[in-house]
Each structure stands twice: as structure tokens, then as C-alpha cells.
Amino acid sequence: IELNYLYFPAQLNKDNVVEEISTGPGGMITFKVHRKLLKMLEPFGEEDAKFGFNSELFNTVKKGKTLVEFSSPNIAKKFHAGHLRSTIIGNFIANLKESLGNHVIRMNYLGDWGMQFGLLGAGFEQFGSQEKLNVNPLQHLFDVYVQANKEAEDNKEIQLAAREFFQKLEQHDSQAMSLWQQFREITVKEYQQVYKRLGVPFDVYSGESFHQEQAREVVQLLQTRGLLKTTERGTSVVDVSAEGDMSSCSTVLRSDGTSLYITRDIAAAIDRKEKFNFDEMIYVTDKSQQNHFLHLFHILRLMGHPWAESCRHVSFGLVQGMSTRRGEVVFLEDVLDEACARMLHNMQQATTTKEMADPGDTAEKVGMSALIVQDFRGPLEADYRFDWDRILQAQGDTGVFLQYTHARLRSTCAQKFVPNWLLIRMQVFINQLLFDEVLYQSNRDLQPRHLVTFLTKLR
Ligand SMILES: NC(=[NH2+])NCCC[C@H](N)C(=O)O
């Protein structure tokens, strides 16, 4: 049996494959293979579906509670390629952690607070429509926001109205809050449907809005701890430089006393630790926020939270040129629709499609896989150009190919007696063992590409 021992040879000395290694006369090396391998002689069973989730290798992996925060779009704003990547990668990490026996909390942290809600609220009061909001909520909220922004450029009145609306929100004025609440609920409901198409569930829809009170407390705390400095411009900052010489500062309070993105993030992290008592917390965003998270973790440490060490930012590269027939991508749904439509089109060129029971459904599933797999091919940090043709190729390391392989393997496994049954059985079993290692390795660097490489080699 030719096994691939490239991964962790040290751990694989004696493991779930090789029970004993001994040398004999004439330079002979004997590998005594584990009895479990006799399983190969048994027919396929239920446990084959659990594929590698109970290997001894995993006993060495630390288990606990993992909070993964991912996707996190902003209400009324564009859902850009970065949000799509965060959704797909975050889901991968959450699945991986779960399969390794961790308790995972999947959190979506919505951009649902800030000055932009002043503009959105005031804009909606002027040119919004309840009817349009019901029919096509995301589109309407986006349109209103864009229009409000444009008009605010040289319209003092709307600027004022926006500021007033946001003030009302900060003071929990019931009318303003109920409109805001409606925007939020409607957005979450829409997103849930789209996430479902990608097979991405969330346990918690949190958001910046939940932490505005706590953000005030954070500022107080920073003050009493002597960590807050006031600048000439009247803003309050925390020194986050390694040398403590103010060469790098993070602003936590504007001169008008309102909190910022990072202030709410500090509050949110502390709140999550209290609520969920996680063992590790992972944030998934594009690399443009690297400094933001470095500052966040630094400030948490300065505030005396040792668990800041168990917070981690998984960042990824930027995607260029993701567009659909409607032009530049604004909504997640458009990307998914486009993937499905293009897949269906490709399928219609192939002859086998005619025998399919539900080509639309197949196109949807294969299209989603194609989107996901193309994102996992390279190292996460790398930027890449989005290319529909490349993504939907039937050969190579694409989701289309993987789905095809999966279907073929399943139908082979479903047959009780195939001519080379033992050979196939053996291969499947060996792959199960290797799969353990792939998961193990993925857990070390949280890179999905190991999995894609493994799967594309699966025959
Ligand atoms: N805790 C966080 N800051 N998470 C990332 C949030 C991402 C943010 N809503 C954005 O779209 O850029």
C-alpha cells in the first residue's frame, strides 16, 4: 500500500495505520498494520459517512468553545466580495472546529449602528416607501441610502435631519427606534434566506448597535485606568504603540463624544467573553482590517484581559473584478443567481443534462460549490481576480469537478458488487485515514486549501 506520509511523519510513526515498525535481517523493514485496516474487507457501512471524525490524531487537538464571527455585512450598504469571502471562509472555520469536537458559536456581527443610520432614517422619511421596502427591502434600503448620501452633499437640511435622526436613535426615541428595528429585522430575514443557499447557518445575529451603551462604559474604564489621552482636536485616543511613545494611537471617542467602530468592538469582545466564555474567538475579515484587530487585541490586553491572547484575526486577500450581468456586485443574491444561471447555461451545452431530473436544482448546487471552492484554492492571504469561466470549469480544482467526482463515487459505493470492489474499498479507507491528517493540518493554519487539494485527488 502506498501511503502518503508527507504530512506529519513524526506523529505518523505509529498511529491509526501502522501499529508496529520493526527491522529484520537483510535490511527488511516490517510494518505491522493496525487490525482496524481489516475493516477494508467489510462492506460499506453507515460509519463511512462520518469520515475521519474520530481519529486518535484528534485527541492531541485542544478542544473547547470557539466563537467564530464572520460575514458581518452592513445594513443598507453593499455586500461586497470581502463579505462573501468572510462568509465562506468563516463557515469553513466553524465547520472545521466543530468536526474536531469543539463547541462552536457562529456569530454575524452586523454593521447596524453609526451615523449612516441617521442618513438612512432621515432619507427614508423623505423619499422612502413602505411598499418598496416590503417588496424588495435590500434594494430599497440601498437606494434610499445612496440617494440620501448624494443629496446630503449640498443639502444642509438633510444633513441636519440625519444628525437629528441619529441623535434620536442614541436617545432611544421610540419612533426612530421602531423604524431602525424594522430595517434591521427585514435585512436579517433577507440575509438568512441567501445564506441558506450557501449552506451557512448562524447562531447569533449580533451587531454594533448592541454595544453602544457598553462602549460608553469602556471609555470610562479606559479613563480610570489612565489609558486615555486627549488630543488637540478633542478626540480621545489610546496609545497602542509597542514602545508606549504614542507613535501609534487608536481613536476611541470623537470630539462630539460619540463612539467609533473600535470602541464598539472593544465592548463587544468583553461582552462576548462574559456571555459565552469562549476559549478562543476568531474574527474573519479582509486584510484591510488587520491593523484594526491588532489595535483591538492590544487595547484588550492593556485593559487587563488575558484572554485577548485567545483572540485571533483570520484575514484574507482582496478580490478584484467580481461583477454580474447587473454590473458591479451590490447584493449577495446577485452573485449566487449569476453562478446558478451560468452553470445552467453550461449544463445545457452538455448532452447528459437532458437526463437530469431537475437541472435547475443541480445548477444551483453545483454553482454554489463552484463559488466556494474557487475561494479555497489558494492561500487565504493572496489577492485574486474573479473569473466566472475559470470558476465554472468542469475540470481541475473547481467545485464543478468536485461535485462530479462526489456523484461518481457515491454511485460506485452504492453498487454492492463492482468488479474492482476491493480496490475501491481500500482506496476509500486509505483516504479516510488521510482525511484525518488534512483536518489536523487545516486546524493548524486554518487554510481551506489543504482540503481542496485532498478532495481533488480523491478518485
Ligand atoms: N468585529 C468586527 N469588527 N467584525 C467585522 C465587521 C465588518 C464590518 N461590518 C465591515 O463590513 O467592514
Image (cartoon, grey):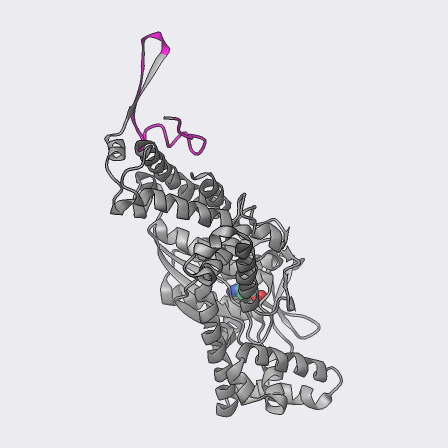
Identify the image quadrant of the C terminus. Answer: top left
For the question of whether residue 308 can be seen, the reply is: no
Q: Position of residue 175 (x, y in %)?
A: 50, 92
Q: Position of residue 321 (x, y in %)?
A: 66, 58
Q: Position of residue 405 (x, y in %)?
A: 44, 45
Residue depicted at x 51% and y 64%:
71
Q: Is residue 6 magenta?
A: yes
The count of marks equals 0
Q: Most extreme residue toward the right, as rendered?
A: 154
Give the quarter the ligand 1 occupies. bottom right
- Please indicate whether residue 440 sits to the left or right of residue 417 in the image: right
From the viewer's side, name the closer residue of 64 and 403: 403
Q: Is residue 401 magenta?
A: no
Residue depicted at x 45% and y 48%:
404
Q: In the image, which residues are magenta? A: 2-27
Q: Position of residue 136 (x, y in %)?
A: 54, 80
- Please indicate whether residue 339 sits to the left or right of residue 404 in the image: right
Residue depicted at x 48% and y 45%:
452
Q: Main secondary structure of the magenta part?
A: loop
- Please indicate whether residue 332 sits to the left or right of residue 55 in the image: right
Identify the image quadrant of the N terminus. Answer: top left
Q: Is residue 225 above or below residue 91?
A: below
From the viewer's side, name the closer residue of 128 and 313: 128
Residue depicted at x 59% and y 90%:
125
Q: Most extreme residue toward the top, as rendered?
A: 26
For the question of whether residue 402 can be seen, the reply is: yes
